[in-house]
Image (cartoon, rainbow, N blue to C red):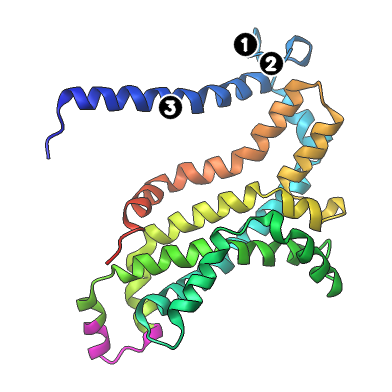
Amino acid sequence: MRIPAREKTVAYVILSVFALFAVVPLVGVVFSAVTPAAENHGAFALPTRIDLGNFATAWTEGMLSSYLVSSVLVTACVVVLTSVLAVLAGFAFARLDFAGSEAIFFVLLAGLVLPAEAFVIPLYFNLSSVGLIDTYEALILPQTAQSLGFAVFWMRNHFRSFPDEIIEAARMDGASDLRVLFRVMVPSSVAPIVTMCVLVGMWTWNEFLLPLVLVTSEDHRTAPLGLAFFKGSHVTDYSLLSAGGVLVALPIVVAYVFLQKRFISGMLDGFGTR
């Protein structure tokens, strides 16, 4: 369908306005991060000179190397666990008939509407009773469970849209359900899986409440939590705070830049339904 030039122009104008609202604050943070501390008063302004030493100071004083390692470890484990479980559960809900599948699926979807604030206190006491407070397991397991509602919904919708003819052909050749899943469906579903991984990775990387409640020592603090403590020590040092924010956000931004083609392709294909 051909879109009239007037509608295209209006769409571009609207999208440009929204893009400005999103990009301008980010540009302001980057400018603030490279502005010398003595010249930074917290306002949006072009730096008169570039001071990259803010990043080194924020890295050392904020102990960001340790916090980033914790975030990478937690995020990687959550993404891997969520992906494996979501692929298996999504296939089961989409392609296998078993008693109570619809009821179980809708119970699982309850995780999409249940905020972390509703269960974080009971979760703390449950983990404390089994000795998991202030461990990586206390961060990995709850965040995996928290991500599964969306991830299973995502993979189920994609697997339901997979062509029946290909699956039937594989089964006629004697392929088992697991072989159909991992030899036929998963290789053709890389884009939706990558999209799911990027989204889960971003949510896990940015999680603040669970690490705040479930972690008590510096050894297991994640980057957003460490940045919050760093902010408390440098409330008026806008350059260091901005530099720390850029360093914490940089890994997930780089990951998105490298995976953006598959991410966009998965966004277009991931919600295919039948």
Q: Secondary structure at mark 2?
A: loop
Q: In the rendered structure, find residue 45 and report the number of the disc placed on it.
A: 1
Can residue 76 be seen here? Answer: yes
- Comes first in the chain, label 2 or label 1: 2
What residue is at 76 percent from the left and 47 percent from the top?
67
Q: Is residue 115 left or right of residue 91?
A: right
Q: Which residue was labeled with disc 3? A: 18
Report the mark closest to the observer, 3 or 1: 3
Report the mark closest to the observer, 2 or 1: 1
Image spot of residue 209 (x, y percent)? 73, 50
Q: Quadrant of the C terminus?
A: bottom left
Q: Residue furthest bottom?
A: 174
Give whichever of 243, 105 is nearer the camera.
Answer: 105
Q: In the rendered structure, find residue 60 and report the number of the disc placed on it.
A: none
Q: Is residue 212 left or right of residue 82?
A: right
Q: Is residue 211 above or below residue 124?
A: above
Image spot of residue 117 (x, y percent)? 71, 54
What residue is at 45 percent from the left and 65 percent from the top?
153
Can residue 73 be seen here? Answer: no
Q: Residues within 10 Å of mark 2 (few under 14, many from 20)?
A: many
Q: CA distance from mark 2 to mark 1?
A: 9 Å
In which quadrant of the rendered view does residue 270 lie?
bottom left
Q: Residues within 10 Å of mark 3 (few under 14, many from 20)?
A: few
Amino acid on which disc 3 is placed: Phe
User: Is mark 2 in CB contact (under 8 Å) with mark 1?
Assistant: yes
Image spot of residue 9 (x, y percent)? 24, 22
Magenta-highlighted residues: 168-178
Q: Is residue 250 above or below residue 56?
A: below
Report if residue 177 lies within the magenta region.
yes
Amino acid on which disc 2 is placed: Thr
Image spot of residue 208 (x, y percent)? 71, 48
Q: Which residue was labeled with disc 2? A: 35
